[in-house]
Image (cartoon, rainbow, N blue to C red):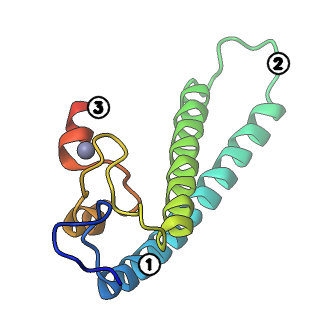
Amino acid sequence: MDSRPGGGPRRSGIGPRERAALRLQLLGELDRVRGQVAGFRSTLDGLLAAADLEPPDDEHDPDGTTAYERAQVASLLAEADRRASALEQALASIDEPGFGICGGCGEPIGVERLQAVPGTERCVRCAGAGR
Ligand SMILES: [Zn+2]
């Protein structure tokens, strides 16, 4: 009842096979990113535990890198967390008609970009424009 050329709502141009491949890719990527999240979290826990052992009033930390290190790992953790959420969202919506449609301009994102940047919600142009 669909497939009338030129008619109907806008489509992402993603076929069932591409969708299945993208799902697998998203699952693999999500697995990898969750591993990163777990790794950063335990690194951060270790740094925080080490910081607890130091005298609280010691401003001149003999190991001056720890505060910086903590900030670094915390931001990596936040970034990986965001990435995992984006991937989960992409997986949750992969069967919906709007999947693969740019959230900025409403044009199809394109299968190549979806494969290159799993979980993206923006086409190349919109991502470049920072939308
Ligand atoms: Zn766009």
Residue 84: quadrant of the picture: bottom right
Indicate if the residue with disc 3 has its beta carbon within 8 Å of ligand 1.
no
Specify few, some or many for label 1: CA neighbours under 10 Å numbering under 14, 14-19, or 20 or more.
many
Name the residue that disc number 3 marks.
130
Q: Position of residue 93 (x, y in %)?
A: 52, 65
Mark 1 element type: helix
Q: Is residue 30 left or right of residue 17?
A: right
Q: Kindly identify the residue that appears in the image at 42 percent across and 67 percent down.
A: 97
Which label's residue is closer to the chain start, 2 or 3?
2
What residue is at 58 percent from the left and 64 percent from the top?
34
Which of the numbered marks, if any, corresponds to residue 59?
none
**Residue corresponding to mark 2:** 56
Q: Nearer the viewer, mark 2 or mark 3?
A: 3
Residue drawn at point x = 57 percent, y = 54 percent: 85
For label 2, the SS is: loop
Q: Nearer the viewer, residue 32 or 54?
A: 32
